[in-house]
Amino acid sequence: MTEELVGYVSGNRKREQIIQALSNTNLGADKIARISRIPERLVVRILEDLKKKGLVKVDEKVYALTETGIDVENKIKSLR
């Protein structure tokens, strides 16, 4: 399952950028948009997809990686 999620994230540059932005800290969608230079509406849509996949969680409009998200992010880092 994790390998499938690694492919899901690494197969799309914008998903990968968002996961990278969340790797160091919890952020709101507006800050993720600024950091990654992706329009905020698209960031929100991608975050919802990542949430459905169990990679991201949200609390009070602040997004964070789940344990699975951290595992996927670490595996992607190791591939580079």
Image (cartoon, helix red, strand yellow):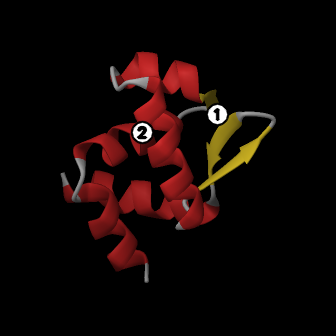
Any part of residue 23 in sight: no
Residue 23: % across, % down: 50, 40
In this view, the residue farthest toward the front is: 41
Q: In the image, is residue 72 above or below residue 27?
A: below
Under tag 1, what secondary structure?
loop
**Mark 1 / mark 2, whichever is N-terminal:** 2
Q: In percent of the image, x 30 and y 41: which residue is there?
A: 14
Residue assigned mark 1: 26
- Three-letter code, disc 1: Asn
Q: Label 1: few (<14), some or many (≥20) within 10 Å?
A: some
User: In the rendered structure, are the residues bearing label 1 and label 2 in contact, judged by CB atoms less than 8 Å apart?
Assistant: no
Q: Is residue 74 above or below residue 3?
A: above
**Inter-mark Cα distance, 1 to 2:** 11 Å
Q: Pointer 2: what residue? A: 18
Residue placed most toward the observer, 28 or 73: 28
- The kind of residue on which mark 2 rests is Ile
Front residue of 36/40: it is 40
Q: Is residue 27 left or right of residue 50?
A: right
